[in-house]
Amino acid sequence: MDLSKPDGRGLVKIVSIEPGEGYTKILFEGPVDGYGTAYISQKFTSIDSTENSGTMMGDARVIMEDGTLVTSPLRGTFWRNGKNIKVFFTDAVSNGDYNFVTWDIDLIDRSADIKYFRLISANP
């Protein structure tokens, strides 16, 4: 898979950051190419005391351009380097799409750059 050529991108803003014991929950919203306006919740659970890596669980709701709602569970892994978090996961969108997704989150700028790579398309 060529990760230099995504099928779509998004730039979402961090709406809130909620720290907890052993985890951090982040809420995002913003546009994603080919889908629409996304509302996303991700819970990051660390696997070590440095809190630099671990697992991510989340959910996405997207209002498509035509008003249709699509959803997807999100499951993946992350690593943190200072203010930056890199996330990798697959999604299973309720419209039949399956994507491999990468996120580059900047905690200080409160933004995330999304790239997705279509694995299966609902509309081949």
Image (cartoon, rainbow, N blue to C red):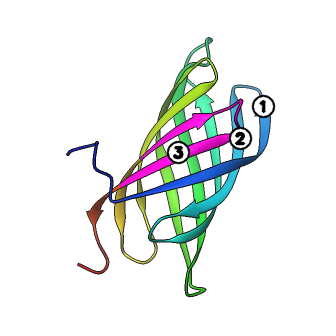
- Read off the magenta span: 102-116
Q: Which residue is mark 2?
A: 25
Spatial CA span between label 3 and label 2: 18 Å
The disc labelled 3 sits on which kind of residue? Asp
Left or right: residue 31 versus residue 3 is right
| Residue 23 located within the stretch drawn in magenta | no
Q: Residue at x 78, y 32 (%)?
A: 19
The disc labelled 2 sits on which kind of residue? Lys
- Badge 1 element: strand
Q: Residue at x 63, y 46 (%)?
A: 42
Dot 3 or dot 2, earlier in sequence? 2
| Residue 108 located within the stretch drawn in magenta | yes
Closest to the observer: 83 or 70? 83
Left or right: residue 116 versus residue 43 is left
- Badge 2 element: strand
> Picture coordinates of residue 32 (x, y %)?
52, 62
The disc labelled 1 sits on which kind of residue? Gly
Left or right: residue 17 versus residue 5 is right
Residue 72 drawn above or below residue 70: above
Q: Which residue is mark 3?
A: 113
The quadrant in which residue 82 appears is top right
Q: Residue at x 49, y 71 (%)?
A: 35
Closest to the observer: 55 or 1? 1
Proximity of marks 1 and 2: CB atoms separated by less than 8 Å = yes
Left or right: residue 103 versus residue 109 is left
Mark 1 or mark 3: which is in front? Answer: 3
Spatial CA span between label 1 and label 3: 24 Å
Dot 1 or dot 3, earlier in sequence? 1
